[in-house]
Image: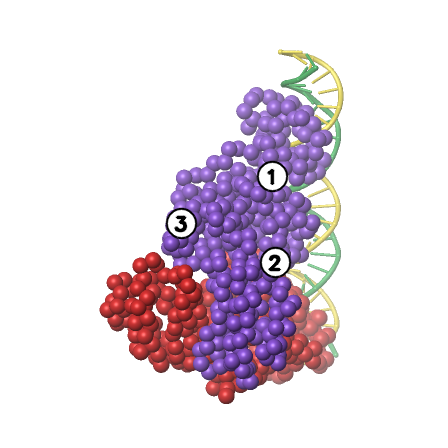
Chain colours: A red, B purple, C green, D yellow
Amino acid sequence: MLTQRQNKILQAIVRQYTATGQPVGSKHLAEKLPFKVSSATVRNEMGVLEEAGFVTKEHSSSGRVPSKKGYRYYVDHLLDPEVITDNDLVVIQNSLGTSFQKIDEIISHSADILSDLTSYTAFTLKPEQADVRLSGFRVVPLGNRKVIAILVTDSGDVESQAFTLPRNYDTDALQAVIRMINDQLVGQPLANVMRRLNDDIPLRVMHYMQSADGFLDLFDSVVSRAAREQFFVGGRLNLLDFSGKHDSVDLQTLYSLLDHNDQLSHLLDSNVSDDGVNVKIGSEISKDKALDNYSLITATYDVDQYGKGIIAVLGPTRMPYSRTIGLVNAFRQELAKRLLNFYRHYYDS
Amino acid sequence: MLTQRQNKILQAIVRQYTATGQPVGSKHLAEKLPFKVSSATVRNEMGVLEEAGFVTKEHSSSGRVPSKKGYRYYVDHLLDPEVITDNDLVVIQNSLGTSFQKIDEIISHSADILSDLTSYTAFTLKPEQADVRLSGFRVVPLGNRKVIAILVTDSGDVESQAFTLPRNYDTDALQAVIRMINDQLVGQPLANVMRRLNDDIPLRVMHYMQSADGFLDLFDSVVSRAAREQFFVGGRLNLLDFSGKHDSVDLQTLYSLLDHNDQLSHLLDSNVSDDGVNVKIGSEISKDKALDNYSLITATYDVDQYGKGIIAVLGPTRMPYSRTIGLVNAFRQELAKRLLNFYRHYYDS
DNA sequence: GTTTAGCACTTAACCCTATAGAGTGCTAAA
DNA sequence: TTTAGCACTCTATAGGGTTAAGTGCTAAAC
């Protein structure tokens, strides 16, 4: 649909504009192009591109700026082969190479590394097994009416929470309830556990103690912590640097978005594609006006039988796509490798 | 040293300037003053105040602006009686009135409330007993080489962390080490525990197992988590709203400060006064240039035998001191009450 | 001896205008 | 089909004039 030359020109416009942030004029462009044409020819071609909606002008006599559609076309058809420098790769490998005690540390640290590399805001989501099951629940007394509740899932995650029993607790009844929970719920997917917690479990508990509330709240809080998608954000502040005009209303919206993990992880879930790196531009991300001038680059990382996770970068529509996509892609591969090692080392027999 | 009239004039300048942000001129001021004088008289008096260093001009023919010294004098001598509205008090009481499961929730939520009320950035520090002692350490096996390490302090705090044992661990040796830790360290202040962890403990562990590292790391991480001052920040973003000129270098400095709990809690410790509310202005806070145009209002809250905590608000030098101080003061009292109740209810016999 | 009215002076902020520079679209020639 | 040339548009910048708010100083009034 576009001629070869028009492709080259659009490509040059996007590159130039993402690099400088200034509208691109015909004369400068004519010099940068890989073939020799006059500025007048470039002007004609730019007219065509504008007609087709790939570029716009900021005012009637300004240079051209890529439109959302132009970015889209660029990302889909004109992207440079992903190049990332050896230096970047070394940084990634080193940062992921240090020793971690817990998965959470790796994932959380990853968000920071990725935001540093891109200088945008980065998100990481823990690899998620389709259905994690409850594999054990126990309550360890610590003396002085304090107990610690410990929940273990078959994916190997452990959640715990301290709790102080009210004065009138009957410890025998408590033991009975814990046995009951283990009988009834071990082996069940966490989703089921959470459902039944509002369903038949309260009734069963009533057999043993008058009020189910205090203890069930505790159990509930531990279960939901284990079930929650683990979500990390790095480089929140980077949003400031490139939002130039500092439209403070939009910024507020954005930051409150970043502070609500549920919304955000939903956003990522809905934007991620099955595999590889995925680019969403402006309104493609969500209906929210505040995201209009942002692009979201998501990617999954695949840790075999241990599940798939998500990494993502949120930056301005006007970003160097080749580099950012290259970084995200390199990162997902390294992260997958690293995690596979981790899981193998710790969880396999 | 200043006449009564000069006091009134300085007071009016500070009030006016903190309210509007505009330099205040003699004519307007003459009208606002509680006694009848001409603008010329005000001008003369302002000349004296400037001579003495309490006010400055932004340029040779602008109105007067309070200097750091002027703010200091105002806060020390000219402050209105603290007035907070009934509404504010209700908000505080309601927000603190909802039910919490853990101390941390109350303290963390408090930072949010306080920042909402003041629309500045707020900090809260958990009440701290002078010397918390280790009262127990145990390791509960969860199967599949996973264990959970649980540490209890005599203040009633519990920290836990999951851990996967390397393949070659000798469980008998592990039990012996745990017994040894309990023998040697229970009853000791956490500070001592941390010191000995780098000192004689590694040697003792070597009696039982070849390498002490993996396990001691775990113990160390749990101990230091328990010993760390618990620190919360609310309303980080509010720094944006009032830093008007958006000097992005300073902002970066500030935000990186907010992200380093150690620096910040050190800052608070060094600024807090023994009791009541304390105001530090500009360079009084720290040597850091980035804080030059900020004021820090700190206060302790006293929960009797359960220790003392800190709350603080960081806002622009140009802030309505009476109101902010009033809010901080009201808040510390309500928070102390609330926590006393909480501790009594849960920890007393 | 204060206080005040009056006045000359200073500065920032605003608006208006002129101009330079970058870019465009169009036309006609190559 | 491409290019040179030209008239036109729009932004950004700098300068000039005006206004409004403020100051300091002096001399008169209280």
- Name which residue type carries label 3: Asn
Depth check, front residue: A315 or A162: A162
Chain name for mark 3: B
* Residue A137 seen by the camera: yes
Residue to which mark 3 is pinned: B341
Mark 1 / mark 3, whichever is N-terminal: 1
Chain name for mark 2: B
Density class for disc 2 (Cα within 10 Å; few <14, some 14-19, many ≥20) is few
- Name which residue type carries label 2: Asp
Provide the secondary structure element on which disc 2 rests.
Answer: helix
Mark 2 / mark 3, whichever is N-terminal: 2
Q: Could you say which disc has been placed on residue B22 in the image?
A: 1
Identify which residue is drawn at 50% across, 88% down: A349
Res B264 → quadrant: bottom right
Q: Position of residue B236 (x, y in %)?
A: 54, 55
Provide the secondary structure element on which disc 1 rests.
Answer: loop
Res D21 → quadrant: top right
